[in-house]
Image (spheres, helix red, strand yellow):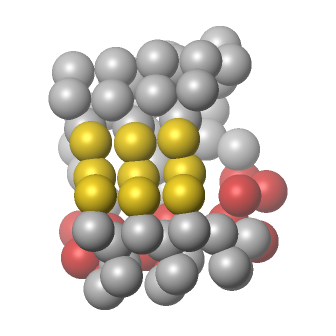
């Protein structure tokens, strides 16, 4: 959701049971590699941010069924 974020809120990385993460319409430029440790994550929406690259660690998200990275 649009919160005017310019950096990823690292507190999210402590939410090991997180299944949905919506951070669309912000100004995020990077995603921490540790996001790949959220093994319960099923839906990830990072569309409309300023991401230059996607960390390969996201491949570790074996339960992820939906990901949206649209510019």
Residue 20 placement (x, y as % from top left): 54, 58
Q: Is residue 42 left or right of residue 55?
A: right
How many badges with numbers are in the image?
0
Q: Residue at x 65, y 14 (%)?
A: 4
Q: Position of residue 19 (x, y in %)?
A: 56, 68
Give the vertical position of 28 relative to 26 (above or below): below
- The answer to whether residue 57 shows anywhere in this view is no
Q: Residue at x 54, y 51 (%)?
A: 21
Q: To which quarter of the image does residue 69 belong?
A: top left
Task: Please indicate whether residue 2 sits to the left or right of residue 14 in the image.
Answer: left
- Asked if residue 1 lies left or right of residue 65, the reply is right
Is 28 placed above or below 69 here?
above
Looking at the rendered image, the quarter that the N terminus falls into is: top right
In which quadrant is the C terminus drawn? Answer: top left
Expressed as whole percent of the image width and height from the top left, the position of residue 43 reads: 41, 58
- Residue at image position (46%, 18%) is 25
Residue at figure coordinates x 28%, y 52% from the top left: 67
As rendered, which of 40 and 38 lies closer to the eye? 40
Left or right? Give the position of 47 relative to 28. Answer: left
Whether residue 55 is visible to the viewer of this picture, yes or no, is yes
Position in image of residue 26 (x %, y %):
52, 19
The image quarter in which residue 13 lies = bottom right
């Amino acid at each position: 959701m649009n919160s005017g974020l310019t950096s990823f809120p690292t507190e999210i990385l402590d939410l090991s049971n997180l299944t949905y993460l919506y951070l669309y319409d912000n100004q995020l430029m990077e995603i921490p590699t540790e996001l790949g440790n959220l093994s319960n994550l099923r839906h990830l929406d990072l569309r409309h941010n300023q991401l230059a690259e996607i960390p390969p660690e996201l491949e570790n998200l074996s339960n992820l069924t939906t990901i949206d990275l649209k510019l």
